[in-house]
Image (cartoon, coloured by chain):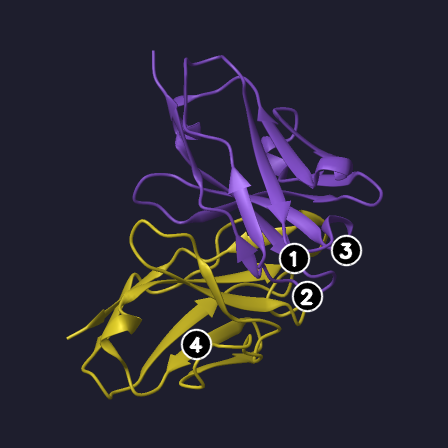
Chain colours: A purple, B yellow
Amino acid sequence: QVQLVQSGAEVKKPGASVKLSCKATGDTFTTYYWHWVRQAPGQGLEWLGIIIPDTGATNPAQRLQGRVTLSRDSSASTLYMELSSLRSEDAAVYYCAREPPHSGSFDYWSQGTLVTVSS
Amino acid sequence: QSALTQPPSASGSPGQSVTISCTGTSSDIGGYGFVSWYQQHPGKAPKLIIFEVTKRPSGVPDRFSGSRSGNTASLTVSGLHIEDEADYYCSSYAGSDGYVFGSGTKVTVL
């Protein structure tokens, strides 16, 4: 049974940073590619970036480059996403999602973590 | 990378069919065979229902089908069920730009 379990909700001030975690259980962590996706309240899905655990290679979404850092601890089957210089528009539910390599799709999703940005 | 274009809403009665379009460019939908569709119920995480344009994951009913023509992908739900009422999002691989999602379509079962 594959499960992706995220850390709890966060409340941050504008300009601060947030680091989210996502722990994967039930399958071989390094076999897959891993993505982060967010959804602002009442809005659609936005792809944030990919990390390949085997190599540590990442590709953040262009509009977030410079503010987002993707990392992993393969020994703990855990992903991390750090977003800096938070703005009000970063308030959203953040998901991690699994991609079977070269499938171009996300077959398992986490429950989501709400990030609130407020002064 | 701009979001793929979907109609904001679609509707049908139980048993009817509904088709949702997803329009992109030759840099995403038209350039790669990696179009997927997700169903999202309120307050829940998205669920994969179509991948690689036409394929269904195990457990997804065969009333869900996908297709593509040029830069436009489509999702058809044949024989609507009440539980199909949800938001639907398309997604496409976009090369070095990573992935792009559609703007989302709310399907209402009348």
Marked residue nearer the N-terminal end (1 or 3)? 3
Binning the other alpha carbons within 10 Å of mark 1 as few (below 14), some (14 to 19) or many (20 upward) gives: some
Label 3 or label 4, whichever lies nearer to me, is 3
Separation (CA) of disc 2 from disc 3: 13 Å
Q: Are marks 2 and 4 in contact (CB under 8 Å)?
A: no
Residue to which mark 3 is pinned: A31
C-alpha span from label 3 to label 4: 29 Å
Q: Which mark is residue A99?
A: 1
- List the residue tagged with mark 4: B75
Query: Which residue type carries mark 1?
Result: Glu
Q: Is residue A115 left or right of residue B79?
A: right
Q: CA distance from mark 1 to mark 3?
A: 9 Å
Tag 3 and tag 4 share a subunit? no
Above or below A98: residue A90: above
Q: Secondary structure at mark 2?
A: loop
Residue type for callout 4: Leu
- CB of mark 1 within 8 Å of CB of mark 2? yes
Disc nearest the viewer among 1 and 4: 1
Q: Earlier in the sequence, mark 2 or mark 3?
A: 3
